[in-house]
Image (tube, rainbow, N blue to C red):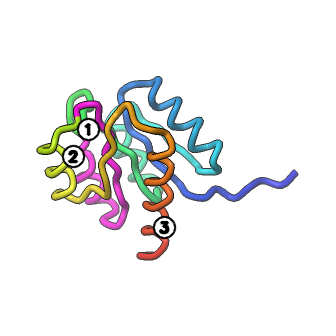
Amino acid sequence: FSRKKAMGKILVVDDDINILRVIKLRLEAEGYQVTTAGKAKVALELANEDVFDFALVDLKLNGTNGIQLMENLHQLNPEMPVIILTAYGTIESAVEAMRKGAYTYITKPFNYYEQLIQTKKCLQKTKLTN
């Protein structure tokens, strides 16, 4: 019984449990180690306890927003890339997310392959900078 080494540790934050499940299943099928959180507070606790290669964060979260969460995650780990996911994609929110440090921005419903490509690029960037 040989276990494949995880290709990267990913934190996924979304208040939609169905989206969390789908992203987790798809990324785990590709060999990634995925931890999910439905609330920003939980995501911060997880990021405080463990080091993630990057985070996928929904822009609209109950009680906060993904950009604020991204800034909080960057206080814990300034080098961690964050991809912002949103169903409310506007030029303004994309510009704000990028200006404040997002690695990239994906609109929902997102193409699974686009998300996978961005995930791979993000992890390559992480490996190059570490």
Out of 60 and 78, give the one closest to the viewer. 60
Q: Which mark is residue 67?
A: 2
**Three-letter code for the amino acid on which mark 2 is drawn:** Ile
The residue positioned 43% from the left and 69% from the top of the image is 125
Q: CA distance from mark 1 to mark 3?
A: 23 Å
First in residue order: circle 2 vs circle 3:
2
First in residue order: circle 2 vs circle 1:
1
Out of 85 and 38, give the one closest to the viewer. 85
Q: Judge the density around disc 1: few (<14), some (14-19), many (≥20) Cα neighbours within 10 Å.
A: many
Q: Is residue 77 above or below residue 91?
A: below
Q: Quadrant of residue 109?
A: top left
Could you tell me if the residues under marks 2 and 1 are in contact, i.e. CB atoms within 8 Å? yes
* Image x and y of residue 96, in percent: 14, 50
Q: CA distance from mark 2 to mark 3?
A: 23 Å
Q: Judge the density around disc 3: few (<14), some (14-19), many (≥20) Cα neighbours within 10 Å.
A: few
**Quick check: is 26 in the magenta stretch?**
no
Q: Quadrant of residue 130?
A: bottom left
**Closer to the observer: label 2 or label 3?**
3
Q: Is residue 29 visible?
A: yes
Q: Which mark is residue 124?
A: 3
**Three-letter code for the amino acid on which mark 1 is drawn:** Leu
Q: Which residue is mark 1?
A: 59
* Image x and y of residue 66, in percent: 25, 41
**In the structure shown, which secondary structural element does the residue marked by tag 1 occupy?**
loop
The residue positioned 50% from the left and 49% from the top of the image is 116
Q: Which residues are magenta?
A: 66-88
Q: Judge the density around disc 2: few (<14), some (14-19), many (≥20) Cα neighbours within 10 Å.
A: many
**In the structure shown, which secondary structural element does the residue marked by tag 2 occupy?**
helix
Q: Is residue 117 above or below residue 41?
A: below
